[in-house]
Image (tube, helix red, strand yellow):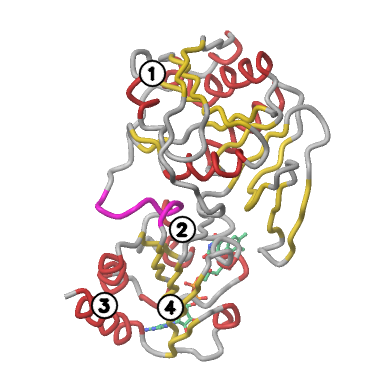
């Protein structure tokens, strides 16, 4: 059976559900080894949280260089391990950090890369949605190790508990990877809401909010959802750019996406149209986003959302 690496994905000191999704996709190809990149002395605690999904082994690479030299050091260490163990594929979460690591690993190992896959088959064929999601592409790496980044929330994860064998490896990081030092970094201030790209439910607001995200946030909190925004809303300074959904923002693929006061420009759709169920609240019945909606409410979001919030709250009581 071939060996497949996944780069374990963490939020703080815990493996994210994306790690289980990567493992589920990887297990279709072969036996899964999760690679944990940790600061010195922190590997065992991190590895202990890599316990969901079909993971046979965990390899822990410890070095403070990961924090000091950022993505270059992470990619270097992973690439060295790939060269040593020759897995048939490496699956990495398709967020900004994951994609940059993947690209560097592909260069360092002279391998092909596929980014933003929404599915991976047993023979390593990856599925991508391109041109704003209008076209499905199946492709396979033909040279070296298959380096594939997989969008969070795209693969239905097997969350069964696993007890992988944990092994400590050596983090081989070249001097070439230490040319740009991270001088300081500030972790994002975490609110009570889930991370946008990992959330099962996302409620987004657009220009229709007119800068008042109160109704959107209250509805999101009632559903335990993350809050997203269109670029019109982030460019206006109404919501942080880190919450922008779309071509130049984040790509989300939740079970439920609720778009409030968003017209449905192609650039916005590109970031959300793989959502499993799409609900649109817009006072203009001609808004293009209704074309891809599973459910639509024609109305003023300032009337619709408080009623919906109240309705859900009443159902919960
Ligand atoms: P609008 O298009 O102005 O739509 C507002 C909607 O709100 C309207 O449909 C209106 O009927 C409705 N509305 C108004 N009041 C209410 C109310 N009270 N209740 C209910 N409905 C109401 N956009 C993104 O979102 N993400 C991106 O990543 C992105 N990247 C881009 C990249 C490039 C290169 C370019 C050129 C553009 C990009 N855009 C992106 C911008 C995109 O083209 C649109 O301009 C933007 O998505 C529009 O945002 P909106 O739908 O909130 O605003």
Mark 3–mark 1 CB contact (< 8 Å): no
The residue labelled by disc 1 is: 39
According to the picture, the residue beneath numbered tag 3 turns out to be 312
Residue mark closest to the camera, 3 vs 4: 3
Quadrant the C terminus occupies = bottom left
How far separated are the C-alphas under marks 3 and 4?
A: 20 Å
Give the quadrant of the N terminus.
top right
Q: Which residues are magenta?
A: 191-199
The residue carrying mark 1 has its beta carbon less than 8 Å from ligand 1? no
Looking at the image, do the residues carrying marks 2 and 4 touch, with CB atoms under 8 Å apart? no
Give the CA distance from mark 2 to mark 3.
26 Å
Residue at mark 2 to residue at mark 4: CA–CA distance: 14 Å
Whether label 4 lies within 8 Å of ligand 1 gets the answer: yes
Looking at marks 2 and 3 on the same chain, the residue that comes earlier in the sequence is marked by 2
Q: CA distance from mark 3 to mark 1?
A: 43 Å
| Mark 2, secondary structure of its residue | loop
Which percent across, then down, holds residue 72? 56, 22
The residue carrying mark 2 is 244
Q: Earlier in the sequence, mark 3 or mark 4?
A: 4
Q: Position of residue 64 (x, y in %)?
A: 40, 15
**Which residue matches tag 4?**
261
């Amino acid at each position: 059976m071939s060996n497949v690496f996944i780069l374990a994905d963490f939020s703080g000191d815990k493996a994210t559900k994306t790690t289980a999704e990567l493992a589920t996709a990887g297990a279709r190809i072969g036996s899964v080894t999760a690679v944990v990149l940790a600061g010195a002395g922190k590997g065992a605690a991190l590895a202990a949280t890599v316990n969901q999904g079909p993971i046979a082994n965990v390899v822990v690479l410890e070095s403070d260089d990961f924090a000091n030299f950022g993505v270059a050091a992470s990619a270097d260490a992973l690439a060295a391990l790939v060269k040593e163990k020759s897995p048939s594929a490496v699956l990495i979460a398709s967020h900004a950090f994951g994609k940059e690591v993947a690209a560097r690993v592909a260069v360092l190992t002279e391998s092909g890369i596929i980014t933003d896959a929404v599915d991976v088959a047993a023979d390593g064929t990856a599925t991508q949605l391109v041109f704003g999601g209008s076209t499905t592409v199946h492709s396979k790496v033909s040279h070296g190790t298959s380096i594939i980044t997989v969008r969070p929330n795209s693969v239905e994860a097997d969350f069964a508990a696993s007890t992988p064998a944990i092994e400590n490896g050596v983090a081989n990081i070249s001097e070439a990877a230490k040319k740009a030092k991270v001088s300081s970094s500030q972790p994002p201030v975490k609110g009570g809401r889930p991370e946008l790209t990992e959330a099962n439910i996302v409620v987004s607001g657009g220009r229709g909010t007119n800068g008042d995200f109160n109704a959107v946030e209250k509805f999101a909190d009632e559903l335990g959802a993350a809050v997203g925004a269109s670029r019109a809303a982030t460019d206006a300074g109404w919501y942080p750019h880190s919450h922008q959904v779309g071509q130049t923002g984040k790509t989300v693929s939740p079970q439920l996406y609720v778009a409030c006061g968003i017209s449905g420009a192609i650039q916005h759709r590109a970031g959300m149209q793989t959502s499993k169920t799409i609900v649109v609240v817009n006072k203009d019945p001609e808004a293009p986003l209704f074309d891809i909606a599973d459910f639509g409410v024609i109305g003023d979001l300032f009337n619709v959302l408080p009623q919906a919030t109240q309705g859900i709250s009443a159902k919960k009581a």
